[in-house]
Image: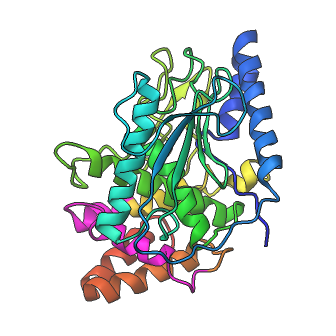
Amino acid sequence: MVRNRVQCIIPPYVLEAIEANGTPEQRARAAATLRIDAVVRADRAEAPTAPPQPAADVTAHRRIYDAGNTTNLPGTLVRDEGDPDSADVCVNEVYDGFGTTLDLYGQVYSRNSVDDAGLDLIGTVHYATDFNNAMWDGEQAIFGDGDGSIFNRFTIAIDVIGHELTHAVTQYTAGLAYRNQSGALNESISDVFGSLVKQYHASPRQTADEADWLIGAGLWAPRIHGAALRSMKAPGTAYEDPLVGKDPQPATMDGYVTTRQDNGGVHLNSGIPNHAFYLAAVSFGGYAWEKAGRVWYDALTDPSLSSNAGFLEFAQLTVQKAEALFGADGRQRIHDAWAQVSITT
């Protein structure tokens, strides 16, 4: 089945708020970003995903391109695997972010690149002009420069880079449909592993208690009142500003949003499984990628997980994985985490 495989870090409702509340220039930039998002979706919608071919001896190479503020993809190759640092900070941030994401998946979960078959990673920086988004388009990651007044450059946050590459992992595993609850799970899983990439990258590495559990910290320009795009620890509290609105994410099913917007609320309702993961991670303690992350990874890659899975199906599978991995204690911790967001497994 062909699915829309373009996923963006900035929800459409944020850009729509800027269109409503911003200056003429800010409104124009937001509208341009929404138009470009739609064009990329249309271009990629019919591109089929080739099934990964096992090739354990193949090593993924990173290739970073510069679009030169055009929408031509991938652009001009500016840094290949093994090349020295570039004079361009965006190029280096993506190259290093790709490397850390590969390390997390490879060293912790024994996964060989996003497809588990050594797929090369392609990233494009300086996409379009003042482009306020980052995305995975089904074939590569794309990063805008931001407009400088509302958003900083989209390569500034390593969890955003990990987030986009995790969309590729989901594409090559469960293939979660990008709508309604399965789409919210898709977004949440990218937030989960994007956060784990950030914690794994930190020096020293961060435990669950030490992590900030913020997604996209540093993306808001100084004038915007907000800590990040989303908070896994406290969904709904990441930002509140007259220009971009208030973070609308619910933390539990009591606040679940039924809507036709945002592909059925994929960026909104992802706060619910996000919060469940946070609760599970702090319950286990230690490094979140070791126990809670392992449970989530094993659930995502289980062939029984359907592409249209809802929250309950995924939650039940995580409980099963936790018991298999960590016994009755692990099962109870995962069960309790989901119960606290009003999902009873």
Q: Quadrant of residue 58?
A: bottom left
Q: How many marks?
A: 0
- Tell me the residue at 70%/28% (across/down): 17
Residue 134: percent from left, percent from top = 59, 38
Q: Quadrant of residue 245?
A: top right
Residue 85: percent from left, percent from top = 35, 30
Residue 109 within the magenta-colored segment of the rendering: no
- Tell me the residue at 46%/48% (across/down): 62
Q: Is residue 304 above or below residue 181?
A: below
**Residue positioned most to the left:** 204
Q: Is residue 334 above or below residue 141?
A: below
- Tell me the residue at 38%/69% (across/down): 337
Image quarter in which the N terminus is found: bottom right
Front residue (pair 147, 94): 94
Residue 163: percent from left, percent from top = 49, 50
The magenta region covers 278-305
Is residue 251 in sight in this rendering?
Answer: no
Residue 285 within the magenta-colored segment of the rendering: yes
Q: Is residue 172 above or below residue 38?
A: below
Q: Quadrant of residue 338?
A: bottom left
